[in-house]
Amino acid sequence: MTDPIVDEVRRVREELIERHGGLDGYLRYCAQQDRRRARQQKRPPATTRKPAATAAAARKLASRRK
């Protein structure tokens, strides 16, 4: 009994191993991708909005407006 999804995964895996020069090259590529993802997760998301005022700063602004 063959599963088409499993067959596709195996085919793609074999192509990636061949593309990266063997199993060692493919594993180095995977480790590189893992490091890249870890670095990207540490970065704060880019934002164009101003940071929200703290509660103390909001009270100070409110008292000036009165």
Image (tube, grey):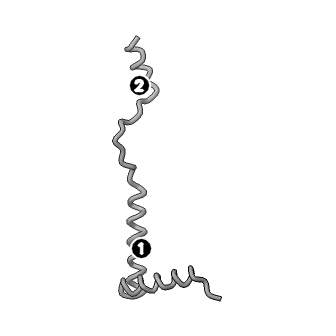
Residue placed under numbered mark 2 in the picture: 57
**Mark 2, secondary structure of its residue:** helix
Residue 20 in percent (x, y) is at 36, 83
- Residue at the left extreme, as displayed: 48
**Mark 1, secondary structure of its residue:** helix
Residue placed under numbered mark 1 in the picture: 31
* Residue 22 image label: none
Q: Which residue is drawn at the image coordinates 41% and 73% (left, top)?
A: 31
Residue 50 in percent (x, y) is at 35, 36
**Which corner quadrant of the image does residue 40 belong to?**
bottom left
- Residue at the right extreme, as displayed: 1
Residue 57 drawn above or below residue 27: above
Q: Which residue is drawn at the image coordinates 38% and 65% (left, top)?
A: 36
Q: Which residue is drawn at the image coordinates 36% and 44% (left, top)?
A: 47
Residue 29 drawn above or below residue 11: above
Bin the neighbour count of mark 1 within 10 Å (Cα to Cα): few under 14, some 14-19, many 20 and up.
Answer: few
Q: Which residue is drawn at the image coordinates 40% and 70% (left, top)?
A: 33
Residue 52 in percent (x, y) is at 41, 33
**Which corner quadrant of the image does residue 29 belong to?**
bottom left
Report how many numbered discs are placed on residues in the image.
Answer: 2
Q: Nearer the viewer, residue 37 or 2?
A: 2
Bin the neighbour count of mark 2 within 10 Å (Cα to Cα): few under 14, some 14-19, many 20 and up.
Answer: few
- Callout 2, which amino acid? Ala
Q: Nearer the viewer, residue 24 or 11?
A: 11
Residue 57 in percent (x, y) is at 41, 25
Residue 22 drawn above or below residue 42: below
Cα–Cα gap, marks 2 and 1: 46 Å
Sequence-wise first label, 2 or 1: 1
- Callout 1, which amino acid? Ala
